[in-house]
Amino acid sequence: MSILPPTVENIRLAGEAIRQGKLVVIPTETVYGLAADATNRQAVESIFNAKGRPQDNPLIVHIGESKWLEDLAVDVPEYARRLAGEFWPGPLTLVLPKLPHVLDEVTAGLDSVAVRMPNDEVAIRVIREANVPIAAPSANKFMAVSPTRVEHIDPEIERSVEMILDGGPCWYGVESTVIECLGDHPLLLRPGGLSRGKIEEVLGTPLNNADQNLKRSPGQYPKHYAPRTPVRLVARLGIDDAGITYHSPLNSNQVHMSASEPEKFARWLYNALHVLDERNVPEILIETPPETPEWEVIWDRLRKASSS
Ligand code: TXA
Ligand code: MG
């Protein structure tokens, strides 16, 4: 395995490796993805092995052109077409009724498939080079924090892939927003890089949450996105605490973030968790962020990271 810059030649090699059924780590605008050919059963199985992820947890299929959707999904609702038209390429995943040939290994046996078209230039070029739809979960071990830079990638993941393409820090820093598009109205399955506000603007109606019911979106476990070190939310860090603060840091294990820029906070959150996790501190404390809607995705990830 090697960490390589995303040159034209390395992107070509990445596409070729994927076509040959191998795993490649690619940057996306949300988090790094562990990519394999979504039409190759064995390649998809190797994703689950590399992550230590249970088989009942379906994967997102990444496409290189909007028209590839027609090869994966049927009965695409009009509102889903509108959302794709507005936000693809970008951090939006649509769960749609699947065509029969989409592998059960990808969808965990569900009748639906999750699809997204990323807007990271390296990701798009690798997908087009491979010329197959690409299954890619976040490139972390099961339940761990997603990598937003190559330095965060677990050595076990490194060992199981053909190559890692280094695209630098991910722009959004949190995973895509996942929307179920199976009924008359869309339902939010997972908040993510694309805010509810932007989606509601296009829909012209409020976006309801799906039931927090594991059957509906397998893989949405209460504890998830968690570092090895326990995480706890607090009002204010003390002089000896390690963690994330909105005030002046009181020691070198305190990371300063802004309480007025939720997008920036999201971009740096996983990096802060990865860095603090390496410091051998007993606990990571995070000052509670504002309660306003723009902080929804951050609250979701903080709740999961701090759930025991
Ligand atoms: O930003 C992202 O979405 C990243 C990058 C690499 O694209 N990928 C990612 O994948 O976060 P993963 O596997 O960590 O999360 C996929 C989520 C899970 O919560 C899973 O339950 C949901 O998508 N999902 C996938 N297929 C589904 C389906 N058919 N029905 C309901 N939920 C589904
Ligand atoms: Mg994940």
Image (tube, rainbow, N blue to C red):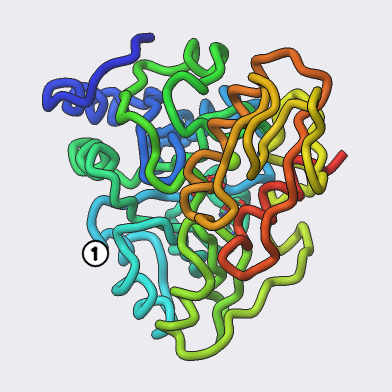
- In the picture provided, is 206 more to the left or to the right than 96? right
- In the picture provided, is 100 more to the left or to the right than 127? right
In the displayed structure, 191 sits above or below 170; it is: below
Residue at x-position 26% and y-position 63%: 66
Q: Which of 239 and 215 is in front in this view?
A: 239
Tag 1's secondary structure? helix
Callout 1 crowding tier (Cα within 10 Å): few <14, some 14–19, many ≥20: few
Q: Position of residue 193 (x, y in %)?
A: 48, 56
Q: Does the image show residue 207?
A: yes
Query: Within 8 Å: ligand 1 and the Cβ of disc 1?
Result: no
Q: Position of residue 7 (x, y in %)?
A: 15, 24
Q: Mark 1 points at which residue?
A: 67
Q: Nearer the viewer, residue 153 or 47?
A: 153
Q: Which of 185 and 291 is in front in this view?
A: 291
- In the picture provided, is 164 more to the left or to the right than 305? left
Residue at x-position 30% and y-position 30%: 167
Residue 19 appears in which quarter of the rendering?
A: top left
State the residue lying farthest toward the left.
Answer: 8
Q: Where is residue 158 in the image (x, y as percent from the top left)?
A: 48, 15
State the residue lying farthest toward the right.
Answer: 308
In the displayed structure, 243 sits above or below 70; it is: above
Residue at x-position 44% and y-position 63%: 99
Q: Where is residue 172 in the image (x, y as percent from the top left)?
A: 43, 48
Q: Does the image show residue 39?
A: no
**Which amino acid is tagged 1?**
Lys
- Name the image quarter holding the C terminus: top right
- Name the image quarter holding the N terminus: top left
- In the picture provided, is 49 more to the left or to the right than 61? right
Residue at x-position 54% and y-position 12%: 155
